[in-house]
Image: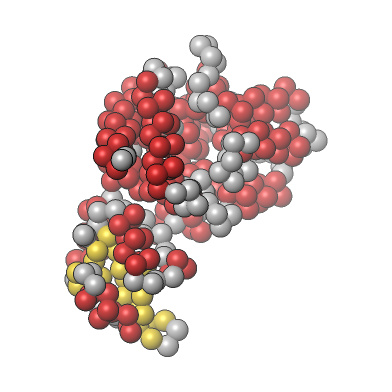
Amino acid sequence: MSILIDPPSWPAHGTLFSHLVSDASLRELHAFARDRGLPERAFDRDHYDVPLERYDDLVAAGAVPLPATELVRRLIASGLRVRAKERPERLDAVLLARWDALRLDAPELGRELLGCWSQEQRVYHDRAHLLAVLTALDTLTGGASSAQAHLPVYLAAWFHDAVYRGTATDEEDSAALASARLPGRGIASPVVDEVVRLVLLTKTHKPAPGDGAGALLCDADLEVLARPKAAYRRYAEAVRREYAHVPDADFTRGRSAILRGLLDGGSLYSSEPGRALWEDAARANLSAELAELEALSP
């Protein structure tokens, strides 16, 4: 177990609070917190805020006491630290600026979509994911200044998980939202149709040969698979939390099938830049996660 806690020295609500973290796994952290009766609302992205009266109990249960500076250092080294600028609530201004850069003269639609991406049930498919996809598109297309030249792709990024309930129809519902919201805003019908097509393509992430726009969107959406090991683990654990209602055995079986399908389905990325940048790292991450899941299988 790698559960760490710093001294209760953070004032709030008439008492002092400690930070409870894991430098190995958010899954381990949540399990420890659940076993000790900590409420889910006490979790804040990478740590639990725990009041002074719980400190001795948590240390007795196995949490390792550390100075605050050492706890932060260990959390950063683990890759599980969520930096302030990465916290979804800090991203609103950045994302709205990105929306305005599309020059659609539709600020209310940008705010509506941002509201969709801010829903409470989202753990991975949130504002941070939206910005990551937009940033990955910048990498593939040559920079944010190219958004106008690739308008359907950038619009599809905004809409591709705008509806997210963890169901089989999320892509269809997101495409339907694009079809309903984009017309009448000075956007040509062929562009609207292309956005809808691209959003639907994220159901399989398998664009046809020669589908350059589809390759850009699908590759940007899958960029997360190629992140450094600790960041990838944070992504995988966030996905698990979005499916917290699914029993462990069922989730392990379903997730394993998805990973095998990705690994056995040919190249993960459809564009040449995507393959060059991310293919090898993504395959290593998927293989490692699959091995861990298979070790958990009965």
Q: Residue at x 25, y 81 (%)?
A: 56
Q: How is the image coloured?
A: secondary structure
Q: Residue at x 48, y 48 (%)?
A: 246
Q: Residue at x 44, y 56 (%)?
A: 87
In which quadrant is the C terminus drawn?
Answer: top left
Q: Residue 131 at x, y = what percent?
A: 49, 44
Does 160 sit above or below residue 275?
A: below
Left or right position of 219 against 50 = right
Does 247 sit above or below residue 254?
A: below
Q: Residue at x 27, y 60 (%)?
A: 22
Tell me, yes or no, if residue 183 can be seen here: yes
Residue 51 found in image quarter = bottom left
Nearest the camera: 73 or 297? Answer: 297
Nearest the camera: 116 or 295? Answer: 295
Q: Of all residues shown, which one is farthest toward the top?
A: 209
Q: Residue 33 at x, y = what percent?
A: 35, 66
Q: Of all residues shown, which one is farthest toward the front?
A: 298
Does 4 sit above or below residue 120?
A: below
Q: Of all residues shown, which one is farthest toward the right?
A: 184
Q: Residue 221 at x, y = what percent?
A: 48, 33
Q: Residue 194 at x, y = what percent?
A: 66, 24
Tell me, yes or no, if residue 97 can be seen here: no
